[in-house]
Amino acid sequence: MSQPTRFRFIVDDDVEKDIEDVEDTDPDQAATLIVLIEEVKGDHALCSRLIDEGYVDEQIAKVAQFASMQRNRYNAYTVRCADVDDWRLITAVDHRKATIALLYIMKRSEDYDETVQQRVAAAYDKLGLEKLGRA
């Protein structure tokens, strides 16, 4: 029986600014997000849950494909955190490199519009994550 993949977890540099934005709005939600990110860094099983479509537990309310990004070959996901109502994590995975990345922390009220998609695509490409399928 094969072992589950042990993913490496990386965070895009721009996420630091996102955390500052959360802190300015709601310090308690920022603290919750920071704790979750730190836990993910040290827990390979928790890390893999950030890309497990439909996954739910006491920390993660929902994981879903970021459909418009997936259609454009970016293997990205949206993650709703159970105790953080106003923000979403945008994650991605590169299975060949066994890497999961945190690309963006976005306001729940934001649309998944072109601006958001450009930010996610830029972070994805900057981190060198492989796109889905063939060019």
Image: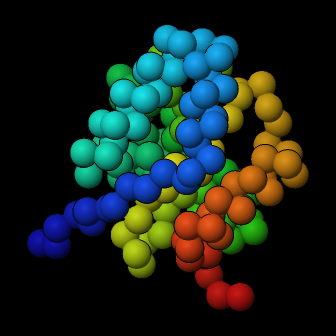
Residue placed at 69% from the left, 55% from the top?
A: 120
- Which residue in the rendered view is the most extreme toward the left? 1
Q: Position of residue 99 (x, y in %)?
A: 41, 65
Q: Would residue 73 be visible to someone looking at this image? A: yes
**Looking at the picture, does residue 118 appear above or below residue 61?**
below
Residue placed at 71% from the left, 62% from the top?
A: 122
Residue placed at 56% from the left, 67% from the top?
A: 127
- Which residue in the rendered view is the most extreme toward the bottom? 135
Number of numbered discs present? Answer: 0
Q: Would residue 65 be visible to someone looking at this image? A: no
Quarter of the figure that contains the N terminus: bottom left
| Horizontal side of residue 90 vs 6, given as left or right | right
**Looking at the picture, does residue 79 appear above or below residue 6?**
above
116, 20: nearer the viewer: 20
Residue placed at 27% from the left, 66% from the top?
A: 5
Q: Position of residue 50 (x, y in %)?
A: 44, 46
Quarter of the figure that contains the C terminus: bottom right
How is colour applied across the structure in the image? rainbow
| Horizontal side of residue 96 vs 112, given as left or right | left
Q: Position of residue 100 (x, y in %)?
A: 44, 58
Q: Position of residue 130 (x, y in %)?
A: 56, 76
Q: Residue 126: which quarter of the image? A: bottom right
82, 33: nearer the viewer: 33
Q: Residue 31: which quarter of the image? A: top left
